[in-house]
Amino acid sequence: MRVGIIGASGLVGDKLIKLLLNNGYFDIKICASLNSEGKIINYISNDVSHSFEMKKLDEHFFEDINVAFFCSDNSVA
């Protein structure tokens, strides 16, 4: 299952990524504001390094997502 996180650069999105990684879940796709597109975010979980690239939020973001978490403000969600 692939998880999408919208608003991944915010506090709630950051905590959600850490929660998923700490529980052994690695198939994560993230996006945030247009200014964040292409930015790489790195996490270390259980001594394993994980890198995620911020994607653009458009209709294609959801094509391979099974579950989406909206951690953004109301204007985006």
Image (tube, rainbow, N blue to C red):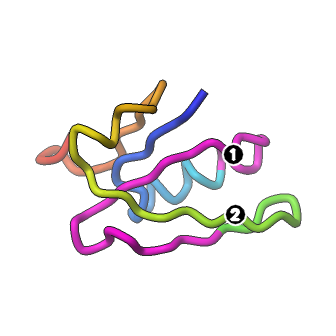
Q: Residue at x 83, y 64 (%)?
A: 48
Residue 77: name its quadrant. top left
Foreground of the two, 75 or 4: 4
Secondary structure, mark 2, is strand
**Quick check: is 53 in the magenta stretch?**
no
**Residue 39, image x, y percentages:** 42, 74
Q: Residue at x 32, y 59 (%)?
A: 32
The three-letter code of the residue at mark 1 reads Phe
Where does the magenta region start and end?
Answer: 19-42
- Residue 26's label in the rendered image is 1
- Residue 36 appears left or right of 42: left
> Where 52 falls versus 20 (above or below)?
below
> Where 50 falls versus 64 (above or below)?
below
Q: Residue furthest right?
A: 47
Secondary structure, mark 1, is loop
Q: Residue at x 56, y 45 (%)?
A: 28
Instruction: Report, in whole angstroms, how far the alpha carbon at label 2 lies from the one at label 1.
Output: 8 Å
Report the number of discs. 2
The residue wearing badge 2 is: 50
- Residue 26 appears left or right of 17: right
Q: Residue furthest left?
A: 75
> Where 17 falls versus 1 (above or below)?
below
**Residue 74, image x, y percentages:** 17, 44
The three-letter code of the residue at mark 2 reads His
Q: Earlier in the sequence, mark 2 or mark 1?
A: 1
- Residue 74's label in the rendered image is none
Contact, CB < 8 Å: mark 2 with mark 1?
A: yes
